[in-house]
Image (spheres, rainbow, N blue to C red):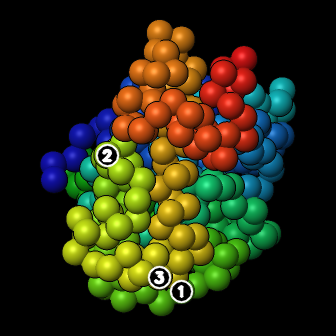
Amino acid sequence: MEFCDNYVIIDNSLDRLTEPAMGDYITHAYCSAGICEIWYNDACFNLHKGDSMIIVANRSVTKVVPSPDFQVKVIYVEMGFLQVCAPHSNYGTRGGLSLYIDPIMRLNDDEQRRCERDFDDVFHRVEHPHKYFHGDEMSVALQLLFIDFFEFHSRIYGDVDLSAQTTSVMNRFVDMLDNGDYKKSREVAYFASELCVSPKYLSEVCKKVSGYSANYWINRYAAIEISHLLKDRTLSLTDISDIFGFSSLSHFSRFVQNNLGASPSSFRE
């Protein structure tokens, strides 16, 4: 993959996080002072001094509110290039899913120092690139940062030994969710059939990898997408219900109530 300068973007603020152009990037941030309120997947998270953050779906960030003394280093990595330089480890599957729920990692003192060094190295290499081997140096520098993030995450959440088959099934399941297959069906049996495994096996894989069931992830992805569509006043409730193939408006309303904690009309208020 030939390296382009826009594959890695560095910044000292989170101002551009909600820009549509950043939708194809994954955000890595380290806070060195202050606090920032971030609305992600319709939940509010606070990034404090000494915290790191990975946003795996920039399109799901709706609001960023930093304190006056907030200081941060940010590395945006284009998704395609990230796949090239990601460590050869199955841990990324589990880490990515848990970060989808909570993107913040509270680092201890040693981890904070390591994280700062990693970010400083990437910043330096972006600002002072090698003439002939810039792509290679960026790949290696980012891989070291990712490995440290894996280490931080495994310390916080615990490590799980995943087989190649388990990782493959989970990756393909997540790909289906990313592609919006939950609009076709929200039944575990549908996803299992498409993946050529049994519903029981798919549920076991999801539980082992993420700690949550397959049904949880299907409903989670669908609910977040629905919450975004409910904010679009040009779409009626019937329009949104039809997009997701609900059998009736009452069925759609029950799903929203159960997964978003409010009726569709109340959620819009």
State the mark number for residue 204. 3
Along the viewing direction, whichever of 16 and 162 lies nearer the viewer = 162
Secondary structure, mark 3, is helix
Q: Mark 2 to mark 3: distance in Å?
A: 22 Å
Q: Position of residue 78 (x, y in %)?
A: 35, 44
Q: Quadrant of residue 212?
A: bottom right
Which residue is labeled 1 in the image?
A: 160
Apparent side of residue 114 relative to residue 10 in the rendered image (left or right): right
Q: Position of residue 141 (x, y in %)?
A: 42, 61
Q: Mark 3 to mark 1: distance in Å?
A: 14 Å
Q: Mark 1 to mark 2: distance in Å?
A: 32 Å
Name the amino acid, label 2.
Answer: Lys
Secondary structure, mark 2, is loop
Q: Quadrant of residue 152?
A: bottom right
Along the viewing direction, whichever of 226 and 116 lies nearer the viewer = 226
**Which residue corresponds to the image point at 72% horizontal and 41% vertical from the top-left?**
261
**Which residue corresponds to the image point at 76% horizontal and 36% vertical from the top-left?**
37
Contact flag, marks 1 and 2 (Cβ < 8 Å): no
**Which residue corresponds to the image point at 80% horizontal and 50% vertical from the top-left?**
49
Secondary structure, mark 1, is loop
Q: Answer with mark 3 or mark 1, whichever residue precedes in sequence.
A: 1
Which residue is labeled 2 in the image?
A: 184
Q: Residues within 10 Å of mark 2 (few under 14, many from 20)?
A: few
Q: Residues within 10 Å of mark 1 (few under 14, many from 20)?
A: few
Contact flag, marks 2 and 3 (Cβ < 8 Å): no
**On screen, residue 125 above or below 264:** below
Quadrant showing the C terminus? top right
